[in-house]
């Protein structure tokens, strides 16, 4: 199926009618693949409410400190600044466009939404959740985030676990963007490219196999990055032009 580039907005889905893939789907799939290759278990999450939903979280992810895949011969992305000795609980916002990217107000300013997300992780007692809920709104203020040099982070496990908030600016390039604690388009693409297009064969990790094993969410991108005729990772616009 050829994608139709459009905005999701708040469209209601008609029962029995599949929704076409749009740019935000592809952005979120790229971020999910990037996190998976960095050793995270990741998924989206719906914060439910009595009518429709409070908000939708683009990605919640967790990475454990003993994660290793030495056969791949790839170091984790340095821009993600993964903590070395603690569980990493990551709340991610995926944003397109070239303007300043921020966390969704319906999450950062709604205590019940924050509680629901923290309960989803299952790593905190209720007392700890309440303490975090008091801190997050101030921590994620857009004017404060832009002044930070690293991702907003809270210690939620006496050193054994960290809660980090990461914005993925999927249509902004690091070299031309404003300073701030973001993961940019070129960070995502360059890292995925490094994983899938090694300069030489890895003895313990064959580059040739059935790419459909990655599943329907990722197979088109994997094929794109493993194309032997490609010499550069390209841009996210190249991903928009793939057949999904």
Image (tube, rainbow, N blue to C red):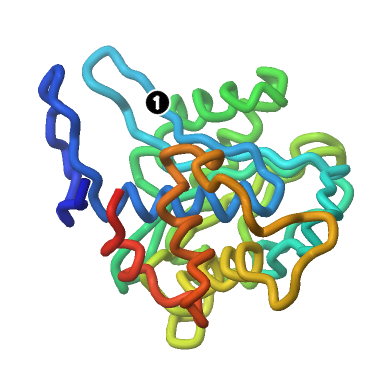
* x, y percent for residue 22: 23, 50
Q: Is residue 91 left or right of residue 79?
A: left
Residue placed under numbered mark 1 in the picture: 47
Is 196 situated above or below 230?
A: above
- Residue 74: x and y in percent read 76, 64
Q: How many marks are shown on the rendered structure?
A: 1
Q: Is residue 54 left or right of residue 59?
A: left
In the figure, residue 172 lies in which quadrant?
bottom left
Residue drawn at (52%, 29%), measured in percent from left and top?
A: 117
* Quarter of the figure that contains the N terminus: top left
Residue closer to the observer: 62 or 70: 70
Could you tell me which residue is drawn at 47 percent across and 77 percent down? Answer: 229
Q: Residue furthest top?
A: 50
Q: Nearer the viewer, residue 222 or 102?
A: 222
Please report the residue visible at 79 percent of the width from the left and 40 percent of the height from the top.
64
Q: Position of residue 169 (x, y in %)?
A: 43, 65
Residue at left offset 66%, top offset 59%? 207
* Residue 65 percent location from the top left of the image: 84, 44
The correct choice, above or below, for 25 with respect to 195 in the image is: above
Q: Nearer the viewer, residue 116 or 82?
A: 82
Secondary element at image label 1: strand
Is 112 drawn above or below residue 136 in the view shown? above
- Of residue 16 and residue 117, the one placed in the foreground of this image is 16
Q: Determine crowd level at label 1: few under 14, some 14-19, many 20+ residues with C-alpha closer than 10 A.
A: some
> Going by the image, does 110 lie left or right of 158?
left
């Amino acid at each position: 199926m050829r994608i139709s580039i459009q905005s999701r907005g708040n469209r209601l889905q008609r029962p029995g009618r599949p929704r076409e893939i749009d740019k935000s789907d592809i952005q979120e799939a790229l971020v999910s693949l990037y996190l998976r290759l960095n050793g995270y278990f990741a998924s989206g999450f719906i914060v439910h409410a009595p009518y429709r939903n409070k908000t939708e979280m683009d990605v919640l992810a967790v990475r454990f400190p003993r994660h290793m895949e030495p056969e791949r011969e790839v170091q984790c992305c340095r821009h993600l600044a993964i903590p070395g000795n603690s569980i990493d609980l990551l709340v991610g916002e995926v944003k397109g466009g070239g303007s300043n990217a921020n966390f969704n107000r319906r999450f950062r300013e709604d205590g019940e939404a924050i509680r629901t997300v923290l309960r989803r992780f299952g790593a905190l007692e209720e007392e700890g959740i309440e303490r975090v809920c008091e801190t997050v709104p101030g921590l994620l203020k857009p004017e404060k985030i832009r002044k930070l040099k690293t991702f907003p982070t809270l210690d939620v496990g006496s050193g054994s676990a960290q809660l980090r908030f990461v914005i993925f600016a999927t249509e902004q390039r690091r070299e031309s963007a404003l300073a701030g604690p973001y993961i940019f388009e070129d960070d995502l693409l360059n890292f995925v490219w490094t994983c899938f297009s090694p300069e030489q064969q890895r003895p313990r990790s064959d580059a040739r196999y059935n790419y459909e094993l990655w599943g329907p969410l990722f197979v088109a991108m994997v094929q794109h990055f493993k194309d032997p005729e490609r010499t550069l990772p390209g841009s996210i616009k190249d991903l928009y032009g793939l057949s999904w």
